[in-house]
Each structure stands twice: as structure tokens, then as C-alpha cells.
Image: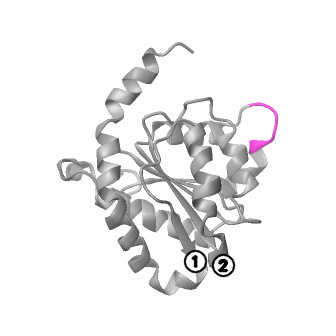
Amino acid sequence: MTVVALVGNPREGSRTLTVATRAAHAVALRRNPTDLGAATNGASGRSYEVVDLSALGPHLLAPGAHPGVEVALELVREASVLVVASPTYKGTYTGLLKSFLDRLPPQALAGTAALPLLVMGDAKHALAVEVHLRPLLVELGASVPTPGLAFLEADFPRLEEVVAAWTDRIAPQVRAITALRPAASAAASRSPA
């Protein structure tokens, strides 16, 4: 199972990146017990990969292909579990995240368990994770089997606790969806384009 954190914050070293990497790590640790031997990525020592769009922003709207963007798109397409994180901007996700996801072809995330995550300053935006980000991921073919995480900035002192509680709640559904991934990927590859 490959876990990838896709972070749509335009600012380097953002709080969104911090929450997303903690969530990806927690999800990777709760994966299928038979997969524990492959718990870390040999190159980075992490149990997940990160696509941080803050470094790719200038290349997303430029004409032609950019190697960094192409690598990022491939990582996202190949993920078994994709944690999609954004700060809440004007009640929804960032344009940076949308610009990146717009580069994916239809059904690019078929067979992927996508976990939406929004970092927000006010609880009044909590529904944005379900009302705005979830439909975008479903439109790309992802399975979104669990409630997303609406993470309040005021909860940063409790980051580990909040992420652990969310991950404990979603782990069974994520394991169930990822167990189906080989069948879903095979079906998608047989579908006419």
C-alpha cells in the first residue's frame, strides 16, 4: 500500500503540510498488518510520499510539461491511499490544488482511497471538506470511504491526538478499500479510453 500526501498550500513549510504529513504517517502505520515489512520508503525513511505543490506552483500553468509536475502526477496516480490536504481559502480548497488535480485525466484515481483534509481557522468551514473537496476527488474516480478531516488551527497543540482519533476511526474503511485496489486497477486498465 502506497500512501501519498498531496498538499495544496502555496506556502512552503505550511501548517497544512504539517497536518498532512502527520495524517499520512498515521494512516501508513495503521495499514494492513501483513504489509508491515514495507513500512518505510527506503530513500526517505518515511512510511509515505509527499507531493508539496508549493514548489510546483509556478510550473502548473506554464505551457508544456515540467518534469517535477509529471513526477508528482505519477505519484498521485499510483497511490493506494491519497491524503489530499489544503488550507481553507474562501470556504473551500486552494486554486493551486485545483490546478494540479485538473491535470489528471478522468478516472485517474480509480481504485485509490482518497482522504480529504482541510486546515481551517474557523469551525464554520468544517463542512467544506465534505461539500467541496470530496466531490472533486469522487469526480476523479477515487473512493472516499470515510469522513474527511476538518482540522482547526486552534487544535495544533493537540495535533497528534486529533490525527490519531481520526485515523483510528477511518482505518478499517481504508484497509477495506485498499484490499480492492488490484481488482479496481485491473478493471480500469481494461476499460476503453
Give the quadrant of residue 68: top right
Question: Which residue occupies the foreground of this view, 17 or 180?
Answer: 180
Looking at the rendered structure, the secondary structure element under dot 2 is loop
Q: Is residue 52 magenta?
A: no
Instruction: Specify which label sits upstream in the sequence, 2 or 1.
Output: 2
**Real-space Cα separation, disc 2 to disc 1, in angstroms:** 7 Å
Residue 164 at least partly seen: yes
Residue 151 relative to residue 88: left or right? left
The residue type indicated by label 1 comes to Leu
Q: Are marks 2 and 1 in contact (CB under 8 Å)?
A: yes
Residue 9 relative to residue 188: left or right? right
- Is 102 above or below relative to 27? above
Image x and y of residue 61, in percent: 80, 42
Question: Which residue occupies the foreground of this view, 178 or 65?
Answer: 178
- Residue picked out by circle 1: 152
The residue type indicated by label 2 comes to Asp
